Amino acid sequence: MRIVISLGGNALLLRGDRPDADVQRANVVRVATALAPLAHEHDLVVTHGNGPQITLLAEESTADPELSAPYPLDLLTAQTQGMIGSLLTRALRDALPGRRIVTLVTHTLVRADDPGLARPTTPLGPSYPRALAEAFARRRGWHIAPDGHGGWRRVVPAPNPERIVETDTVHELLGGGSLVVCAGGGGVPVTTDGNAICTEAVVDKDLAAARLAADLKAEFLLILTDVPNVYAHYGTPDQRPVLDTTPSRLRAGRYPDDTMGPKAEAAARFVAGTGAPAAIGALDAAYAIVQGRSGTLVRPDLAAG
């Protein structure tokens, strides 16, 4: 079975972890240990988040007095793909001796007229006092918004992924027996795929994984995070686990945009578009989720009539 796996940003940095290299090296061993049993039985494509890493690089770039301007987001996304991809590749090679593992820097095609490009809502980088954030906004042309905790953060557009430009290359690598790490951070967004023009935006990594999985004709989309399953009414007295659901019911749940929302929409898109199943659950339970013993399983809606 061909499985596309979307790793949450917490795979390399758990909540509360310092963003030290040694911490990420240690955490990635846990990732490889969780995925190795699946790799023994299935063809895997692994995608990953980059939120903590791109935040760190953006902060360093903004503060660097040697730069006339901070590095653009397309280059920062590419940097995180290389760094995280190298960590994953080495850990997976140790866990899967003899298996070919390759990391591919990938680009994601977005429409130049995507409405999302005009609505910057995705937080990026650290929080600042309002006066400093406003100064950066004037100097750098940033959009800023309250972070909900008394600070202000830069916000950027997150257009819809139309296609992973290197999909055919990923397909060829899979055909040769490689485990492929790609589409990190949703991929580097580009508005053309010939003479590529990068845009100052990011792509949601779960939505990019769903697009890639559909185009690769994957038979399962596995979205891994730091909770055991989707919860209805999360954080309220009515909280309950959602263990078996459909695209329409997931979408009706209206999960928050900054947590479970993109994961639910990614699973819904993949299942509705392909008829193949998806699941959402905890990293350490990856094998059990595919076996149907953990997580939230998403299956096609029954045809009316």
Image (tube, rainbow, N blue to C red):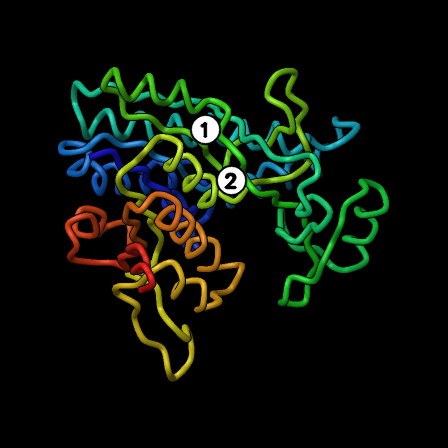
Q: Secondary structure at mark 1?
A: helix
Q: Vertically, is 121 above or below 158?
A: below
Horizontal side of residue 279 vs 208, given as left or right: left
**Identity of the residue drawn at 19% across and 30% down:** 95
Horizontal side of residue 110 vs 67, given as left or right: left
Report which residue position mark 2 lands on: 53
Q: Nearer the viewer, residue 30 or 299?
A: 299
Q: Nearer the viewer, residue 284 or 5?
A: 5
* Crowd around label 2: few <14 · some 14–19 · many ≥20 (10 Å): many
On the image, the x and y values in percent for residue 229 come to 30, 62
Mark closer to the chain start, 2 or 1: 2
**Identity of the residue drawn at 45% across and 54% down:** 265
* Crowd around label 1: few <14 · some 14–19 · many ≥20 (10 Å): few
On the image, the x and y values in percent for residue 208 come to 47, 39
Residue type at mark 2: give it: Gln
Q: Vertically, is 81 above or below 141?
A: above
Decide if residue 281 is in sight here.
Answer: no
Q: Vertically, is 113 above or below 79?
A: below
**Identity of the residue drawn at 57% across and 43% down:** 160
Work out which quarter of the rendered image holds the N terminus and state it.
top left
Report which residue position mark 1 lands on: 83
How far apart marks 2 and 1 lie (CA) works out to 9 Å
**Residue located farthest toward the right when viewing the structure as drawn:** 138
To which quarter of the image does residue 210 belong?
A: top left
Q: Vertically, is 240 above or below 7?
A: below
Decide if residue 297 is in sight here.
Answer: yes
Confirm or deny contact between disc 2 and disc 1 (CB under 8 A): yes
Mark linked to residue 67: none
Q: Secondary structure at mark 2?
A: helix
**Identity of the residue drawn at 15% across and 57% down:** 293
Horizontal side of residue 117 vs 57, given as left or right: right
On the image, the x and y values in percent for residue 5 come to 32, 40
